[in-house]
């Protein structure tokens, strides 16, 4: 089919589950949508070597359900039940990235159909090694390419052992600064925390109302610890000491599986909780990522900016790796508010760039952040990306109008 589209100069738009947030599946120039959802087989699980090969329609939840009795799991968790190859295409991450890394760290090999129909195995046919020094890293080049270089038809993924012990906790703080300072200090002390999520006072209030919780309405950290019983106990002790020095409350524990699921479901439902703050309005989620030492500064500046411009934007983030989101709630019929939101999100991205960060930690570039990508990587960087695109896709048929 790709060969036919190539011969007829018809654009190709790969589709996974449609959960992307930057317009990655929009048909900017028409064309054919390649819907991959029915290619949903798990092809090869090797528990001894910690890898699995999946087709593009397999979602992260279905994979972890399949792995349930193997003692292994796939930890990359963007919240939505996204397709795994779609997650590779956008270089997704999520709540577990601080310990287990992003998709870029967990994709070993991919089968990619190039625009002209040729089939590429990015690390070589059936290769499943832990590391390599052999040639250019084609796998990493296609991770995050957002469907602009080829169609991912298989992915071999790195798996991880299910931890012996897991504990989750909630800790409230007197200020945003105290919560984010605790995050920085926990990481600086080398605590191998699995999840450390920040919710500002607006967000925790929204989650309380939407998910039926009763946490203190204050800047809050959701934390999760993985390891052996002894290791988890040590991690908790270190973390409690650090949060206490920053004015944090006593931990509220979620120890059994049901309580942990409730906690993280509430976090993953932050989008819907935010929308419920202004019924009838729409949401736009933007994300940036900065060095962790710069987190307190940029989050405080973002909150002050929203207050000054009368905007509603609860903040939540995977602050363990410097990534956070402002979920902007706006009335699309109010042109003035739409303008203020656009200007705010551009200012936020440029603040991140000024602090040596990135305009997107995990959502991708898609349609809306192309100008910001140019500012981030510079003219030479954009030129090289265009040269790669022109070499692999000389007719500009693969998801045209995106990224560059």
Image (cartoon, rainbow, N blue to C red):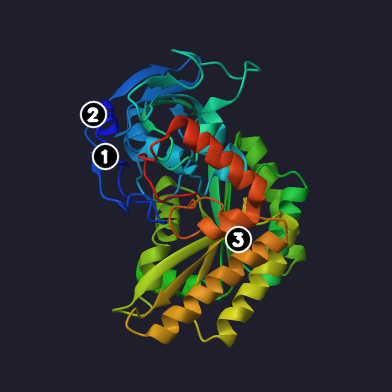
Query: Eyeballing the image, is 364 above or below 341?
Result: above
Residue under the point 66% across and 45% down: 380
Q: Earlier in the sequence, mark 2 or mark 1?
A: 2
Under tag 3, what secondary structure? loop
Question: Which of the pair 374/350 is nearer the observer?
Answer: 374
Give residue 47's mark. Answer: none
Q: Residue at x 30, y 51 (%)?
A: 29
Residue labelled with disc 3: 251
Q: Residues within 10 Å of mark 1 (few under 14, many from 20)?
A: some
Label 3 crowd (10 A; few <14 / some 14-19 / many >=20)? some
Observer able to see residue 315: yes
37 versus 126 height, above or below? below
> Does dot 1 land on a helix, a strand or a loop?
loop
SS label for mark 2? helix
Res 243 visible: no
Q: Earlier in the sequence, mark 2 or mark 3?
A: 2
Query: What's the distance in space between the residues labelled 2 and 3, CA to CA?
Result: 59 Å
Circles 2, 1 touching at the beta carbon (< 8 Å): yes
Above/below status of 264 relative to 142: below
**Residue identified by numbered label 1:** 10
Residue 187 x/y as whole percent: 72, 49
Task: Please name the residue shown 31% across and 79% down the image.
Answer: 279
Q: How many marks can you see? A: 3
The dot on residue 4 is 2
Residue 126 lies, in percent from the top left, at 44, 13
Identify the image quadrant of the N terminus.
top left
Q: What's the residue at 53%, 34% (across, down)?
A: 388
Sequence-first disc among 3 and 1: 1
Percent of width and height locating residue 28: 32, 54
Q: Are marks 2 and 3 in contact (CB under 8 Å)?
A: no
């Amino acid at each position: 089919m790709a060969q036919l589209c190539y011969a007829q100069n018809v654009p190709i738009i790969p589709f996974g589950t449609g959960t992307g947030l930057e317009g990655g599946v929009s048909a900017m120039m028409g064309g054919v949508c390649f819907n991959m959802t029915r290619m949903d087989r798990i092809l090869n699980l090797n528990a001894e070597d910690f890898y699995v090969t999946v087709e593009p329609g397999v979602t992260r939840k279905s994979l972890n359900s399949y792995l349930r009795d193997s003692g292994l799991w796939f930890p990359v968790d963007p919240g939505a039940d996204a397709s795994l190859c779609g997650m590779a295409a956008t270089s997704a991450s999520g709540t577990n990235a601080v310990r287990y890394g992003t998709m870029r760290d967990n994709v070993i090999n991919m089968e990619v159909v190039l625009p002209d129909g040729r089939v590429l195995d990015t690390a070589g046919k059936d290769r499943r090694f832990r590391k390599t020094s052999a040639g250019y890293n084609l796998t990493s080049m296609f991770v995050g390419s957002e469907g602009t270089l080829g169609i991912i038809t298989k992915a071999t993924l790195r798996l991880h052992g299910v931890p012996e012990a897991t504990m989750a906790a909630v800790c409230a703080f007197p200020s945003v600064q105290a919560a984010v300072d605790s995050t920085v200090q926990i990481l600086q002390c080398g605590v191998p925390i699995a999840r450390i999520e920040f919710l500002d006072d607006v967000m925790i209030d929204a989650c309380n109302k939407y998910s039926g919780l009763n946490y203190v309405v204050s800047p809050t950290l959701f934390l999760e610890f993985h390891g052996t019983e002894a290791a988890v106990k040590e991690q908790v002790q270190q973390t409690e000491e650090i949060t206490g020095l920053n004015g944090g409350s006593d931990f509220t524990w979620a120890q059994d599986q049901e309580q942990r699921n409730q906690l993280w479901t509430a976090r993953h439902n932050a989008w819907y909780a935010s929308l419920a703050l202004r019924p009838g309005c729409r949401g736009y989620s933007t994300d940036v990522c900065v060095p962790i030492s710069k987190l307190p500064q940029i989050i405080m500046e973002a909150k002050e900016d929203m207050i000054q411009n009368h905007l509603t934007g609860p903040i939540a983030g995977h602050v363990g790796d410097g990534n956070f989101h402002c979920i902007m709630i706006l009335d699309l019929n109010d042109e003035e508010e739409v303008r203020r939101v656009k200007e705010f999100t551009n200012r936020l991205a440029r603040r991140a760039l000024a602090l040596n960060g990135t305009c997107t930690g995990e959502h991708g570039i898609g349609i809306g952040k192309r100008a910001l990508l140019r500012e981030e990587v510079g003219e030479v960087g954009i030129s090289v990306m265009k040269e790669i695109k022109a070499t692999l896709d000389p007719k500009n048929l693969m998801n045209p109008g995106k990224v560059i």
